[in-house]
Image (tube, helix red, strand yellow):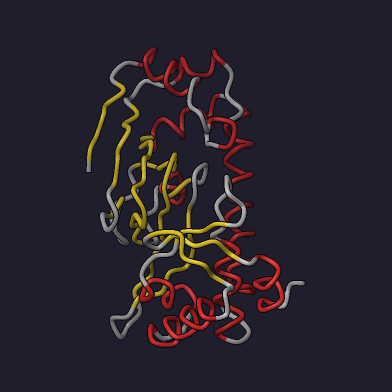
Amino acid sequence: MRGKSIEAAWRGQAECQGCGIRESALFADLLQQDFALVHLPIDEIQFEPGLALYHVGDPGQAVFTIRTGLVKLVRYLADGSQRIVRLLRPGDTAGMESVLGQDYEHTAIALRPALTCRIPREVVTRLAENTPRMHAQLMSRWQRQVQQADAWLTSLSTGSAKARVARLLLLLLDQNASRQCDLFGREDMGAMLGVTTETTSRIVAEFRRDRVLTELGPNRYDCDVDALLRLAGMD
């Protein structure tokens, strides 16, 4: 984990205003004068794959805006197994429950190298209390999380295992290269879909044999999107 402190409010203003994903991030609607309310440092932190942004039950002290990479939210079951309940991509926010003074509800772990902005809870609270723009953005993000949870439940937790894998691949399509996606460990894929690691591995191997997936490099694939839509029952 590598951290870079944005030590002064004016420096934080400059970095936030010039952020490449600002339009989709938590500070999207803020105006220049709103940044005068930022009196605590915002930390830029890089998490390598496998490292946790926070753990379930930790005191909620900050929210994290995902700038690059991919983060999984994990719930651990009574039998010790894990279930991945959501994926966070650039522009998404992790740890929203901290704004309400609650402990973190999940463990957030980087699946790919993730560059984040760690925003202290007090900063978000002060902005929400003093500008309607932040309040509206928070409400929008709560609604988005509800929608994502509903979509996750209906898309990745129902239907045949093959349909679930196809839907996950469609979800993982690169935003900049619409036919390509990066896969990760089959255990993680199984934990997202509620199927075994063996089942996930078998289906991915079948997709490769049928040219639904064509390997371009380590864990990088070209996808036959039309075939995936048919397999997912979405054509």
Q: Residue 93: x, y in percent?
A: 48, 45
Most foreground residue, 152 or 135? 152
Quadrant, the N terminus: top left
Seen at 38% across and 36% down, the residue is 117
Most foreground residue, 89 or 118? 89
| Quarter of the rendering containing residue 185 | bottom left
Seen at 28% across and 20% down, the residue is 7
Quadrant, the C terminus: bottom right
Seen at 57% across and 74% down, the residue is 211
The answer to whether residue 60 is left or right of residue 144 is: left
| Quarter of the rendering containing residue 223 | bottom right
Instruction: Identify whether 213 is placed above or below 201.
Output: above
- Name of the residue lying farthest toward the right: 235
Instruction: Identify whether 93 is placed above or below 203.
Output: above
The answer to whether residue 118 is left or right of residue 161 is: left
Q: Residue 199: x, y in percent?
A: 44, 87
Most foreground residue, 107 or 2? 2
Q: Residue 230: x, y in percent?
A: 71, 76
Q: Residue 232: x, y in percent?
A: 66, 76
The answer to whether residue 93 is left or right of residue 132 is: left
The total of numbered circles placed on residues is 0
| Quarter of the rendering containing residue 152 | bottom right
